[in-house]
Image (cartoon, grey):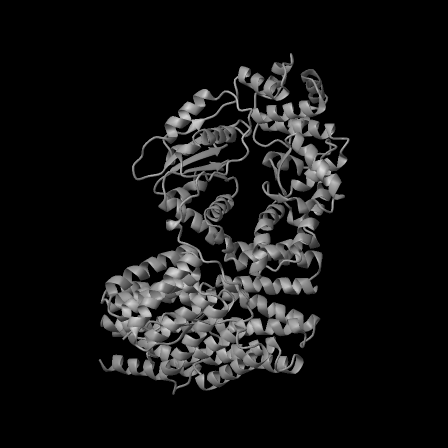
Amino acid sequence: MPSNPHGSDGTPDPRRPPVYEIRDGQGVQVGNHNVQHNIYERHVHAPAVITPMERVEAPAGLINLPERSALFVGRGGEMRRLREAITASSPGSVVVTAVHGLGGIGKSALAAHYADTHRAGHSLVWWITADAPTSIETGLARLAVALQPAVGTLPLEQQTEHGLRWLATHGGWLLILDNLPGPNDAAALLARLPGGQVLITSRRTTGWHDITTTPLSLDVLEPGQARELLTRILTHDDPGADAVCAELGYLPLAIEQAGAFMVETGTTAGEYLDLLGRYPAAMYGETAEGGDTQRTMARIWRVTLDRLADTPLAGKVLRVLAWYAPDDIPVALLSDLDDELAVIKSLGRLAAYAMITRTGEAIGVHRLVQAVTRTPDPDDVHRTPADVAHARERATRALSRALQPLDPEAPQDWPVLRVLMPHAQALVSNTDPEDDTGDTIFVLGQLGRFLGNQGTVAMATGYLDRCLVDCVRVLGPDHPVTLTSRNNLAAAYESEGNLRQAIQLYRAALADRERVLGPDHADTLVSRSNLAFAYRSAGSLEQAIPLHEATLVDRERVLGRDHPDTLTSRNNLAGAYETAGDLRQAIPLYKAVLADRERVQGPDHPDTLASRNNLAGAYRSAGDPGRAIPLYEATLADCERVLGADHPRTLTSRNNLAGAYEMAGDLRQAIPLYEANLADRERVLGPDHPSTLTSRNNLAAAYEMTGKLGQAIPLYEATLADCERVLGPDHPDTLISRNNLAYAYWLARDLGRAIPLHVATLAARERVLGPHHPHTLSSRYNLAAAYESAGDLRQAIPLYKAVYSAYKRILGPGHPETQAVRASLRRARGR
């Protein structure tokens, strides 16, 4: 019989090699399709109770339009065409209308005027500025929080999913995606919306027929409309108004900026044209983005700054603001530029000329203004290379200072970090790495750690890689910050499932710390522990166990027997023994760690709860549900009391209890608990969280154990598809899911699908994890059993022999797993 690496019958099957893995920086034992986490020093606050978005109704009048100008003129024909397009009936699909045209041409103004005019006909109207890759996700997250404030306690990606889920399950809404780069940037969102109305504005002029049959092209204002707009701003007729509008290309935003300048300074149209004329055509040169109209806006930027000469701080403020994300810039980031009153005055002057917008303590700057402002021009006194570079350094220093007191792993700091992270991303993306400084290094480190903690591992790895390169260049290869940066990058690779790269970096970090800091430094001991844990995750127990043992001895000597790091080392060593199947050493050590943590840290400390969970898991690994289940039940009760019913650790404890019931053959208790826990994880963590995917896998396994392959196989297939989409095709969790599906096909006697999937899984595990990893050995055994079932003993016997040889070497000839493989080999030879 082939074996599933998690087990399928709830009891320790000697035919099934154990499976172990790393998940979210926590030790994870996967057995019987269940996960048992060895958790170390992570402190997470319980999230608020969150109602499923399907049951949340929008508050009456929910609308978040940007402040609409009272100066909207003309556009009558455009409004009629837009109304016809956006109300077009399309049963069973979302109605999408795109308005495209040049930057500053008034697309946003038209969309806002339309939405405000017809707001009463919608359940809600929601505006998202969608000009960056993450803007739509952020806007959907804000929608979710507006609909249900408790969602704000979740990570950003889960907030986004809640917002999307609400749109997908309600109708009558209007969603505006403003300044979208192109059709493809909304494709993923639109594919999940079965109904509703979406209004898109974009500078992109082509490709819209793929998502809408009614794209609308918006042109500049008619000369008479442009004059009307300027006259309404000035509140009086000016004989030179037509000439000003013509000079500005009838671009609404440029006219509004010019009018604001003229009102604030008392400048006539003729004087304004004179000021423009005194600047060379270079104003339309390299600082322009996308055409004459945008270059005209750049001219206005320089004229405006000249007229703010009596407030020189205004230019400095604008140059600093240019390096952040355009929206919701905290005023506090400007606090070190000058005294509070001077900064407030400068912001007021900038707002008066429409160079910025300010709402409370948040500042917005037009993206074009930012792009021009941070582009050095030796011929522009407001954008000299030295001034632009100085502003970048000031912006970086201010952001670094704001991030310094915040811990990316502390949930209480996440709300502030979520405000600052977009500005950190904008800053580093617009900064040449060669210009990175020590402050940039700190920003990159905080950015990478926070995104990694939130599950955006690939992006986090990129930032941490740049951080390490900067550290070596700026601080030197042996600086303590450089050594920490190397360790952090290794951890990111480990979370990503790239254990080979992680081990290589951990080795380098350990060697450097031993050489620079000494073998007994606390950071050196951390590096040694991290490397041992990575070896264990990679299945290299012959390297992991001696290193764990040595680290424990060193920590007891240097830190003392009761230091939290020492207790963690003792726990990690117990986990390594358990991974090796040496439960005679693992269980007593787990017991000792639990007793020590209860004595030192208290019975309700999260680490103590983790130790209790680990001991229960060891009993379960030993096939002793009689001791595992009561301990799991007690641990779950403690987690619910101390951490709350929806805390991630509580959900893990509930999952583990279900697994223990399954192992004991009590599927009547296991399956409902699995089903409830899956629903809870989908609600609290989101449908794509790795723990949610694990719960889905576990439920499929429980269905499989009851013989309900008709329910198990579709759930396995869906889980594999989700793992491939969310985690990638080579992630260890994806490979586990692929193995489980192949095993289910084998149970269904569908060898035509089982064997190719086992072959693919084995090849991927050999490539990703290596030929001797426990998962790889399990895949090799499962493929041998599938070949045996197909009567192909010529291929089955060599595979059985290879697994038997590996188990004799790793576990010993008397180990039950080794004996099970030996029995399979004898059976195949005897056929």
Q: Nearer the viewer, residue 42 or 742?
A: 42
- Residue 162 in percent (x, y) is at 43, 50
Q: Relative to residue 695, is residue 322 depicted above or below?
A: above
Residue 231 visible somewhere in the drawing: yes
Q: Can you give x and y, in whole percent of width and height, for residue 785 in the image?
A: 28, 73
Residue drawn at (49%, 31%), measured in percent from left and top? Answer: 112
Q: Nearer the viewer, residue 471 or 681?
A: 681
Q: Residue furthest front?
A: 60
Q: Is residue 572 above or below residue 219?
A: below
Measured from the top left, where is residue 819 in percent x and y?
34, 84
Up/down of 415 relative to 542, above or below: above
Picture quarter with the N terminus: bottom left
46 vs 595: above or below: above
Going by the picture, which residue comes out furthest to the top? 239
User: Looking at the figure, which quarter contains the C terminus?
Assistant: bottom left
- What percent of the width, then of the height, locates residue 808? 40, 83
Residue 795 shows in the view? no
Q: Nearer the viewer, residue 429 or 421?
A: 421
306 relative position to 563: left or right: right
Count the marks: how many?
0
Give the left or right position of residue 512, taking residue 635 as reference. right
Which of the pair 257/731 is nearer the observer? 257
Instruction: Please tell me in which quadrant of the rendered image residue 558 appears.
Output: bottom right
Question: Residue visible at 43% across and 76% down?
Answer: 634
Q: Relative to 575, is 282 on the left or the right?
A: right
